[in-house]
């Protein structure tokens, strides 16, 4: 069965610092991987996704993630945090033939200190 | 704004009652997904419809049911409500039912069962 583990339910960084949010997945078949962001009182918005091809994926708002099959990881990074990045981030996995329903991690709440 | 609308935004009801949550997908999207977000279970996939037909079922209780109408809007019916059903319910839509297609999330309906 597919599953997603996000290390750290809460991450705090200073403005301008590197953002690193960790995601590891478990999948018996090639996965498709996603990062979503949820701002307070809003729905989820897709940041980026990996399906096939280039393993380094660039998304919106300066975020990127790298698919590492050997490490079963899909960590999310941003070189320089901005106050507006404060939100909750969800890693999700699905796979071909699943009709697209997503399996989510527990989420990581990112705080950005001035 | 994702283009997915959900009504109502908030719903407060009592145990044992029945409620209906409504979702209108983005124009042109044929697939609708329902997810439940709670503090203890996180984000969980409930059920998916594609062009009026049920396509996939996740962790949906027997007390819950859904349907997608000819105009493609969907309703999630929750009956015999329990305190533990209190959660945020999201609807998402995508063009088709493939894993490649991005899912666009609505703002959610917050259900409180007293």
Image (cartoon, coloured by chain):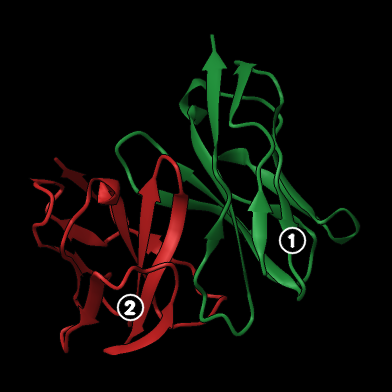
- Chain shown in red: B
Q: Residues within 10 Å of mark 2 (few under 14, many from 20)?
A: many
Q: Residue at x 45, y 71 (%)?
A: B58
Left/right of residue A8 with respect to residue B39 in the rendered view: right
Name the residue at 18% across, 56% down: B81
User: Looking at the picture, does residue A32 appear above or below residue A38?
Assistant: below
Q: Position of residue B108 (x, y in %)?
A: 26, 51
For label 1, the residue is A26
- Tag 2 secondary structure: loop
Asked if B89 appears above or below B101 in the picture, the reply is above
Sort mark 1 into few (<14), some (14-19) or many (20+) by Cα contacts within 10 Å. Answer: some
**Relative to B44, is B64 on the left or the right?**
left
Instruction: Tell me the chain of label 2.
Output: B
Q: CA distance from mark 2 to mark 1?
A: 30 Å
Give chain A's shade: green
Observer-nearest of B40 and A82: B40
């Amino acid at each position: 069965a597919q599953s997603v583990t996000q290390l750290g339910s809460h991450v705090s960084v200073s403005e301008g610092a590197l953002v690193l949010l960790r995601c590891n997945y478990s999948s018996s078949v090639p996965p498709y991987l996603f990062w979503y962001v949820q701002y307070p009182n809003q729905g989820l918005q897709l940041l980026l996704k990996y399906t096939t091809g280039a393993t380094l994926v660039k998304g919106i708002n300066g975020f990127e993630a790298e698919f590492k099959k050997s490490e079963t990881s899909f960590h999310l990074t941003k070189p320089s945090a901005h106050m507006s990045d404060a939100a909750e981030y969800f890693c999700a996995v699905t796979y071909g033939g699943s009709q697209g329903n997503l399996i989510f991690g527990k989420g990581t709440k990112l705080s950005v200190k001035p | 704004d994702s283009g997915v609308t959900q009504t109502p935004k908030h719903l407060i009801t009592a145990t044992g009652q029945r409620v209906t949550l409504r979702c209108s997908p983005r124009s042109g999207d044929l697939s609708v997904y329902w997810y439940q977000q709670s503090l203890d279970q996180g984000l969980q996939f409930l059920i998916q419809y594609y062009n009026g037909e049920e396509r996939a079922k996740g962790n949906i209780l027997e007390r819950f049911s859904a349907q997608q109408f000819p105009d493609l809007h969907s309703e999630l019916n929750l009956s015999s409500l329990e305190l533990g059903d209190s959660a945020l319910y999201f609807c998402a839509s995508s063009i088709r039912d493939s894993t490649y297609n991005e899912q666009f999330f609505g703002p959610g309906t917050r259900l409180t069962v007293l």
